[in-house]
């Protein structure tokens, strides 16, 4: 398996530049809207397309990825909530371990189940430490994984969890407030985590404006993920034109 997606993320990080991923939920994107949606993505500063959701019916992810690949050359990376979302039609996969929780199914169980499926693909597999942070409301990730997010005030626990993920050999750390989060992750949390890490830092959840995105970048995010904001208001792309 190649590692071109991860190499690119690392090289951009080394140059001090920033990346933006548009997250598309297969349950919420109509296939006949993809062409128009991707046109707007291409006019924006987006560099990656992430595909996934906490609760997605079997087969939908593959159908969406096939349709996306007809319209874009941007890297399409799986961001799966379950192994049924794995498809060899994508370019890569964030191989997530929910290290903020203590449910063994989402720390290692689902990952073991995924191995035989991944072995039949050429997906670039990127080991990713996934850290869910409390945002003011229950998220689908919390409900499906049966884990509690780390409280925002517990910054030392957040920092130590991120660093533990790096020391375990994970290649990315993903700070997540959750889809439709009431509150995005604060600049203070991002900055504190960033100072400890040598690996790239992804931040997502609750980012609904260019100012919030820039704030995350300024605090140290190497890659920002925006999903719900585009689902609710595609004109948001106008704020992010190249």
Image: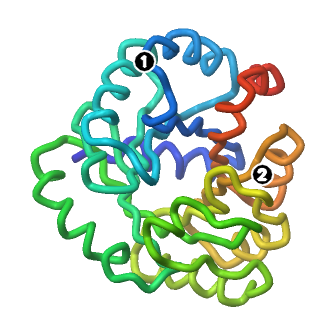
In the rendered view, does 6 fall on the left or right side of 89?
Answer: right
Whole-percent x, y for residue 242 in the image? 75, 20
Instruction: Kindly identify the residue that appears in the image at 84 percent across and 39 percent down.
Output: 209
Give the quarter of the image for residue 213. Answer: top right
Element marked by disc 1: helix
Question: How many numbered circles does the render carry?
Answer: 2
Instruction: Kindly identify the residue that appears in the image at 45 percent across and 36 percent down.
Output: 27
Task: Give the answer, above or below, for where 148 lies relative to 185.
Answer: below
Whole-percent x, y for residue 218 in the image? 83, 54
Which of marks 2 and 1 precedes in the sequence?
1
For this rendering, which residue is in front, 26 or 159?
Answer: 26
Residue corresponding to mark 1? 31
Q: How is the image coloured?
A: rainbow
Whole-percent x, y for residue 220 in the image? 75, 60
Task: Give the answer, above or below, for where 32 lies relative to 57.
Answer: above
Whole-percent x, y for residue 91 in the image? 33, 36
Residue corresponding to mark 2? 217
């Amino acid at each position: 398996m190649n590692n071109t997606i991860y190499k690119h993320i690392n090289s951009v990080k080394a140059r001090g530049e920033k990346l933006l991923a548009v997250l598309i939920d297969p349950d919420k994107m109509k296939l006949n809207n993809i062409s128009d949606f991707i046109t707007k993505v291409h006019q924006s500063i987006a560099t990656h397309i992430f595909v996934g959701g906490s609760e997605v019916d079997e087969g939908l992810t593959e159908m969406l990825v096939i349709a996306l690949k007809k319209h874009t050359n941007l890297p399409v990376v799986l961001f799966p909530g379950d192994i049924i979302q794995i498809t060899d039609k994508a370019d890569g996969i964030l191989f997530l371990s929910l290290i903020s929780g203590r449910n063994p199914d989402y720390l290692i169980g689902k990952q073991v189940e995924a191995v035989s499926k991944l072995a039949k693909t050429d997906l670039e597999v990127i080991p990713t430490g996934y850290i869910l942070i409390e945002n003011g409301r229950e998220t689908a990730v919390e409900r499906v994984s049966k884990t509690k997010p780390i409280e925002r005030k517990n910054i030392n626990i957040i920092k130590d969890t991120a660093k533990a993920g790096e020391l375990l050999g994970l290649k990315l750390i993903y700070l997540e407030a959750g889809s439709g989060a009431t509150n995005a992750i604060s600049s203070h949390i991002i900055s504190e985590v960033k100072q400890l890490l040598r690996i790239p830092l992804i931040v997502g959840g609750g980012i609904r404006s260019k100012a919030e995105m820039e704030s995350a970048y300024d605090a140290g995010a190497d890659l920002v993920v925006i999903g719900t904001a585009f689902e609710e208001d595609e004109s948001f792309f106008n704020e992010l034109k190249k």
